[in-house]
Amino acid sequence: MANHLRFVGRTVMVQNGNVEAAYSVLNRILMQDGVADAVRRSRYYEKPARARRRRAFEACRRVY
């Protein structure tokens, strides 16, 4: 259930048949939530040492 909570309320409406605008809004929402980066990251295997370095770097970025 926890994995699906970030998708609650993430609905993009297509207005006047303008699919490109709705697609750009959806991409912006996914980039802000970090979903696109997580999917891109999980596409290939990440070595545990590299994953630890990445998580430490992300934690430092959040702090500073």
Image (cartoon, rainbow, N blue to C red):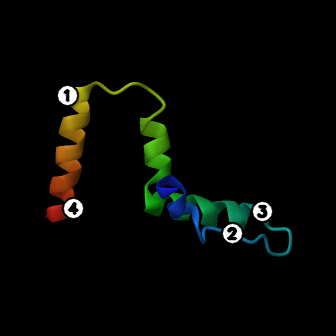
Q: Toward which corner of the image does residue 63 lie, by quadrant?
A: bottom left
- Under mark 1, the amino acid is Ala
Disc 2 to disc 1, how far (Cα)? 38 Å
**How many residues crowd around disc 1 within 10 Å: few (fewer than 14), some, or many (20 or more)?**
few
Q: Looking at the image, is mark 3 or mark 1 earlier in the sequence? A: 3
What secondary structure is marked by label 2? loop
What secondary structure is marked by label 3? helix
- Under mark 3, the amino acid is Val
For disc 4, the marked residue is 62
Disc 3 to disc 4, how far (Cα)? 34 Å
x 73%, y 61%: residue: 20
- Under mark 4, the amino acid is Arg
Q: Is residue 34 left or right of residue 52?
A: right
Disc 2 to disc 3, how far (Cα)? 10 Å
- Residue 54 against residue 8 in the figure, above or below: above
For disc 1, the marked residue is 49
Disc 4 to disc 2, how far (Cα)? 28 Å
**How many residues crowd around disc 2 within 10 Å: few (fewer than 14), some, or many (20 or more)?**
few
Q: Give the label on residue 19, or none.
A: 3
Q: Looking at the image, is mark 3 or mark 4 earlier in the sequence? A: 3
Disc 3 to disc 1, how far (Cα)? 41 Å
Where residue 50 appears, as percent x and y from the top left, is 23, 30
x 44%, y 35%: residue: 42
Where residue 21 appears, as percent x and y from the top left, is 70, 67
Q: Toward which corner of the image does residue 22 lie, by quadrant?
A: bottom right
- Residue 15 against residue 48 in the figure, above or below: below
**How many residues crowd around disc 3 within 10 Å: few (fewer than 14), some, or many (20 or more)?**
few
Q: Looking at the image, is mark 1 or mark 4 earlier in the sequence? A: 1
Front residue (pair 21, 7): 7
Q: Looking at the image, is mark 2 or mark 1 earlier in the sequence? A: 2
